[in-house]
């Protein structure tokens, strides 16, 4: 075991969002686990509430 591993903190514990369902991790921040149609089990996407030219919008981070 890595000596620093004991210092890690997982604020969500073992909680995982259901496939393709958004999971709020903080105000304006959502986590999505998407099952792709190929060999990977899932990909993680992050939805961030944003403002663009004065209008509410979202930024998606892969």
Image: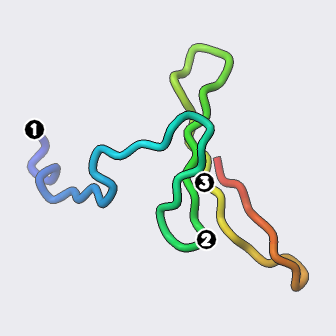
Query: Which residue matches tag 1?
Result: 1
Label 3 environment density (alpha carbons within 10 Å; few <14, some 14–19, many ≥20): some
Say left or right for 30 vs 37.
left
Query: Which residue matches tag 2?
Result: 28
Query: Which residue matches tag 3?
Result: 46
**CA gap, disc 3 and disc 2:** 10 Å
Q: Nearer the viewer, mark 1 or mark 3?
A: 3
What is the residue that sits farthest to the right in this orientation?
Answer: 53
Which badge, 1 or 3, comes first in the chain's sequence?
A: 1
Q: Is disc 2 placed on a helix, strand or loop?
A: loop
Q: Is disc 3 placed on a helix, strand or loop?
A: strand
Percent from the top left, x then y, of residue 18?
51, 37
Q: Which of marks 3 and 2 is in front?
A: 2
**CA gap, disc 1 and disc 3:** 29 Å
Say left or right for 29 vs 11.
right
Residue at 49%, 69% in the rendered image: 26
Residue 26's tag is none
Q: Which of marks 1 and 2 is in front?
A: 2
Residue 46 position by quadrant: bottom right
Label 1 environment density (alpha carbons within 10 Å; few <14, some 14–19, many ≥20): few
Percent from the top left, x then y, of residue 10?
28, 55
């Amino acid at each position: 075991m890595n000596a620093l591993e004991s210092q890690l903190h997982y604020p969500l514990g073992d909680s995982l969002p259901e496939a393709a369902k958004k999971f709020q991790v903080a105000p304006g921040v959502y986590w999505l686990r998407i099952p792709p149609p190929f060999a990977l089990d899932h990909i993680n996407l992050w939805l961030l509430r944003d403002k663009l030219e004065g209008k509410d919008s979202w930024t998606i981070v892969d």
